[in-house]
Image (cartoon, rainbow, N blue to C red):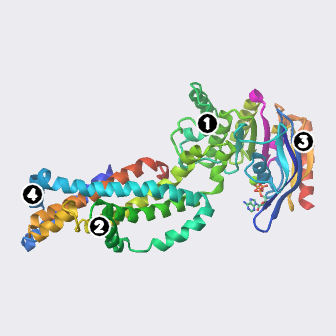
Amino acid sequence: MKKIWSYLAGGIFFTLLWWGVSLVLSLPIVPSPWEVVARLLQTFTETVAIHGFYSLWRIMVGLLLAILLGFPLGLSMGYYPSLDRYLAPLVYLTYPVPKIALLPIFMLLGGVGEAPKIIMIFLIVVFQVIIAVRDSIRAIPAETYYPLFSLGASFRHLFSEVLWPASLPKFITALRVALATAISVLFFTETFGTQYGMGYFIMDAWLRVNYLDMYVGIMVLSLMGLALFSLLDAIEYRATRWQRKG
Amino acid sequence: MIEVKNLSVRYGEEKFVALTGVNLTVPTGTVCVLIGPSGCGKSSLLRAVAGLQSAAGGEVLVDGLPLKPTEKKIGFMPQNYGLLPWRTVRDNALLGCRIKGTIDSGTEARLARLLAVLGLKGMEDRYPGELSGGQQQRVSLARIFLMEPDILLMDEPFSALDTITREDMQEVFLSLWRKQAVTTLLVTHYVEEALYLGNKIVLMASHPGRVTDVMENPLFGATDLRSDPAYFALAGELRRKIKETRGA
Ligand SMILES: Nc1ncnc2c1ncn2[C@@H]1O[C@H](COP(=O)(O)OP(=O)(O)OP(=O)(O)O)[C@@H](O)[C@H]1O
Ligand SMILES: [Mg+2]
């Protein structure tokens, strides 16, 4: 509860700061927060919502694919050192390649549709997930498995009693870190070859010199990121209760 | 019956000899206590019996067969208690039953009774990180008692408890043991505990880890150990033997 209040206070402070700057500058390029909110409420259902929906959909699909592939892969690499020996070099060689630089290639191969955008998000998130999950599995001391081994536990039990809870904290942190990058990259990819998405909406408003719409776009994109962050926070809060003492 | 035949255990690249030529028999329905200096391989022996540590030589048989954790219920209580940090006291205590699939309508009541006996009432929803060492140890006891195992392997099960609590827990152990008469291998550092809880006492020595002596113990489960004159004679003998193996 305390946390919520401090976040609220932060939000109010930020809004007041923005308002102050808009009053001091009084230029059309910095509209006041109230104008932006009014504009948002007025245009949300007819224009902004559909763009927001597209962006959210791309992020969610990219994220989901990254988890579906990254989690089992990281888990296997952490659990089977022999597999890690083969795959780790591949992961480490490709991890530092700036994924965004590959966008032109994916656009050439996959056209300008949804696929390249989703692939970009997938690529950014998947490496973080693989590495985080692998490292947390590797960090589990052998003794942690002993009670399960001595009980003759099946893999299903090993997973639910040890592997999943042990990897969850780092897994969620990885998602959070990757998500910030993923949203920036999403913005970038949406400025090409699409009529939908918050990236398109913001750049389009900018080209039309409609600063109010541009701010509406920035605000929606930020709120979207914030919502995803809060969602991860809530999941983390529920799932890793054992890490909080007292 | 647990039979250890010419068992040796080695660790690491250098093949450090932790145990060599260990022979040991625990007849069905008896308690065998392992006692010996720190580092003599008591935990290694227990892990080898539980099948958690592969043997460099020799074998371990339970009822004449190699031990299969899927077929037998092994109540293994490791020296570090073996609690899962992400499970509450309740879920840790229920781990054995959960994995063996033996949770039924009576389990909840038995758990509550056991936790009360072990002095853990009201701590059901705490995590191991929120418990003292002695409380963690008692959760681990709850886990193995609750699952009604076929064999019990306990590594210093009362080490983290104060004297009074330890005596209480030894009582709890004995009363539960009397009900189920589980074949038990128990590690301890205390001469008194060995004499109180063991039908048979196995002395071990280090460098390399081995069994040096096996004593039958007529005092097992005696109601008033300290007032029994035989106790002092046996305790003295046991202490002397432990000192000898240390000098050797
Ligand atoms: N995983 C391991 N890798 C290498 N050496 C080990 C390992 N586990 C134990 N040892 C070594 O094997 C020997 C026996 O260890 P063990 O833990 O079985 O002793 P212990 O009798 O249980 O001692 P304590 O009474 O202190 O618990 C020790 O010298 C120890 O250093
Ligand atoms: Mg030990």
Q: Counting other residues with Cα less than 10 Å from the Cα at mark 4, is it few (<14), some (14-19), or many (20 or more)?
A: some
Q: Which residue is mark 4?
A: A39
The residue tagged with tag 1: helix, strand or loop? loop
Q: Which quarter of the image is occupied by the C terminus of chain B?
A: bottom right
Q: Which mark is residue B119?
A: 1
What kind of residue is marked 3? Answer: Phe
Marks 3 and 2 on same chain: no
Tags 1 and 4 on a common chain:
no
Residue located beneath label 3 in the image: B232
Magenta extent: B178-195
What SS does tag 3 mark? helix
Q: Quadrant of residue A141?
A: bottom right
Chain of residue at mark 2: A
Host chain of mark 1? B
Which residue carries the number 2 mark?
Answer: A184
Do the dots labelled 4 and 2 sit on one chain? yes
**Residue B37: percent from the left, percent from the top?**
82, 56
Q: Nearer the viewer, mark 4 or mark 2?
A: 2
Label pair 4/3, CB-CB below 8 angstroms: no
